[in-house]
Image (cartoon, rainbow, N blue to C red):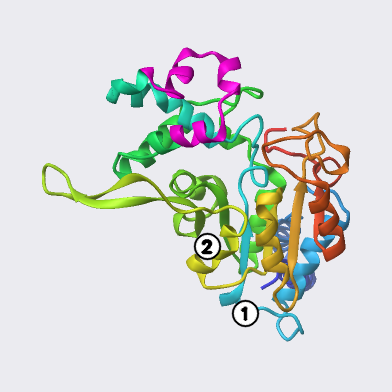
Amino acid sequence: MNLMILAQRTWNSAVTTTRLCSHVERRHGAPLAVLGLSLIASTAVFAADPLASWNDGPAKQAIVEFVKATTQEGGSQFVSPAERIATFDQDGTLWVEHPAYSQLFYCLSRVPAVVKAKPELASAEPFKTVLSGDRAAMAKLTLDDYLKIAMVTLSGMPTDEFKQQVRAWLAEARDPRWKRPFTELTYQPMKEVMQYLRDNGYKTYIVTGGGQDFVRAYSEEIYGVPAEQVVGSAGATEYVYDKNGKPQLIKQPKVVLNDNDAGKPENIYLMTGRQPNAAFGNSTGDKQMLEYTKAGQGARLVMLVLHDDAEREYAYGPAQALPETKVGTFTQPLYDQAKRDGWTVISMKKDWKKVFAFE
């Protein structure tokens, strides 16, 4: 049931009960009035704004109207609960992606351990540069260099061991700017949207270009999204037996799913068999997922986060004359397409009362 409808019905019930209590009170004494006040207090919880970190405006209104249209039984745009799907990019949409993706920080942190296990890598590039700690030299590494690092640091271990490694790193690692755990740098407004959609019968999926296993290690705890609802770039695994004969899966240095660009809608269908009703992104890598979502019939919610708040987070585009970036690029053509095709652009600066829960 739509929370707004539930809140209204609960309020009406509370008012009726309070009037009844007042009538009984006149005949039998005061204690029942306390019950009426208690019910009113409970109603206030139901009536609370589920999108409290959003400023009133077109973006917030679009979310509320979409939920109302798709969950109102008998309405022309009603979507059955089994078909309610919402997809969210992660980096730059659900948490901070600058100055580099969190998973890249993780991979770099694993290089010493990998080199210890494979000493021959110590003199090989790009591992030699990473071990040097020379930031200027590391800044010159290419995409292929980072892919080599990823292939080595994200493979060769059992899947359970990898999960433990990620969780241990997240517990200790700190973002270079805020000096806080990466998991605290999630966007409070977006987490509210995810919960609001779930409260109204939607399944929320994380659809990320990052590693599927990496995100699955923390998705339920941080976002309320279970592992099976994470769609990401995925490496191969091999079924083997350990020295005690116990079966296990070993992560392999081979990509089987590339969850970027057109890979996003392709993998959404592969993993869910459905077309999303709502989709949220922030960069050119999300373009096809948003197009695919918007192309469906009935009410559709397609939103792009524009990072235009250098004070509270970061400002980059280059859409709307914002600074250029190679991480989470939001181009002017993408912005123009959003305006032309009826997508909603979320201004971090204008639409969000707060960015992080700790503010």
**Is residue 133 located in the magenta-colored stretch of the structure?**
yes
In the rendered image, is residue 103 in sight? Answer: yes
Type of amino acid under label 1: Ser
In this orientation, which residue lies closer to the viewer: 164 or 294? Answer: 294
**In percent of the image, x 80 and y 68: which residue is there?**
65
In the rendered image, is residue 21 in sight? Answer: no
Q: Quadrant of the C terminus?
A: top right
The 10 Å Cα crowd at callout 2, few under 14, some 14 to 19, many 20 or more, is: many
User: What is the x, y in percent for residue 145?
Assistant: 50, 31
The 10 Å Cα crowd at callout 1, few under 14, some 14 to 19, many 20 or more, is: few
The residue carrying mark 1 is 80
Rendered view: 199 above or below 146: below
Say which mark, if any, is on residue 9.
none
User: What is the x, y in percent for residue 284?
Assistant: 70, 50
The stretch of residues the image draws in magenta is 123-149
Name the mark nearer the viewer: 1 or 2. Answer: 2
235 on left or right of 356: left
In this orientation, which residue lies closer to the viewer: 347 or 71? Answer: 347
